[in-house]
Amino acid sequence: MKGTPPPFAFLLRHPAHFVALGFGAGLAPVAPGTFGTLVAIPLAFLLTRAGDAAYAVATAFLFAAGVWSSSVAGRNLRVPDHGSIVIDEVVAFLIVLYFTGLDPLRIVAAFLLFRLFDIVKLPPARAIDRHWHGGLGVMLDDLVAAGYALVVFALAVRARDALVAGS
């Protein structure tokens, strides 16, 4: 994790901190990115009930709020992409869940794929992570991880369907 976890008081000191730290998930003492990713699951269930347009608008709003809040929180933590900033995982995984669906098995598969690609940071995610400082950079590398997760998920579904059709 980049930086030491901030105290609970940091979360409440500024609205940007609350958003950037994934509504508190970023305070997890270990694997805050994993806890941040988990925050997206109940949000996805709520947003799905509101319909596709509401899901898209809410996700776009959270992305914009994430750019702003992670910039403010990173500046105040003195680490641009501090490990406790997890709004990027929340937003990126919301996007993944929109396309994979909310069947429990699909959520688990999507979760594992997203976390793998978020940690490994295949190109161009690693370059974004290293060279784009500030809120936009924080948010974008996770969108790349989401893209990789969705491609692999789609390929796995196609492979499964081909196997089922062939048997």
Image (tube, rainbow, N blue to C red):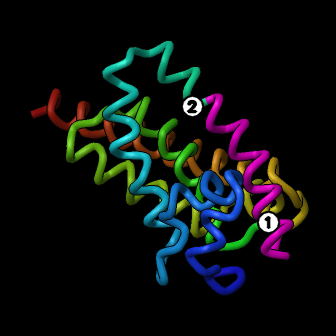
Nearer to us: label 1 or label 2 = 1
User: Is residue 153 rendered to the left or right of residue 93?
Assistant: left
The 10 Å Cα crowd at callout 2, few under 14, some 14 to 19, many 20 or more, is many
Mark 2 secondary-structure assignment: helix
Counting from the top left corner in percent of width and height, residue 70 is at 74, 56
- The quadrant the C terminus occupies is top left
User: Is residue 143 rendered to the left or right of residue 103?
Assistant: right
Q: Amino acid at mark 2?
A: Thr
Q: Is residue 76 magenta?
A: yes
From the image, give the main secondary structure of the stretch colored magenta: helix
Q: Is residue 40 magenta?
A: no
- The quadrant the N terminus occupies is bottom right
- Judge whether 156 appears above or below 135 on screen: above
* Residue matched to label 2: 59
- Judge whether 78 appears above or below 110 on screen: below
- Judge whether 144 appears above or below 117 on screen: above
* Residue matched to label 1: 74
The image quadrant that residue 65 belongs to is top right
The structure residue drawn at horizontal position 29% and vertical position 53%, both measured from the top left corner, is: 108
- Judge whether 46 appears above or below 84 on screen: above
Q: Bounds of the magenta span?
A: 60-79
User: Is residue 54 rendered to the left or right of residue 49?
Assistant: right
Q: Amino acid at mark 1?
A: Gly
N-term-proximal mark, 1 vs 2: 2
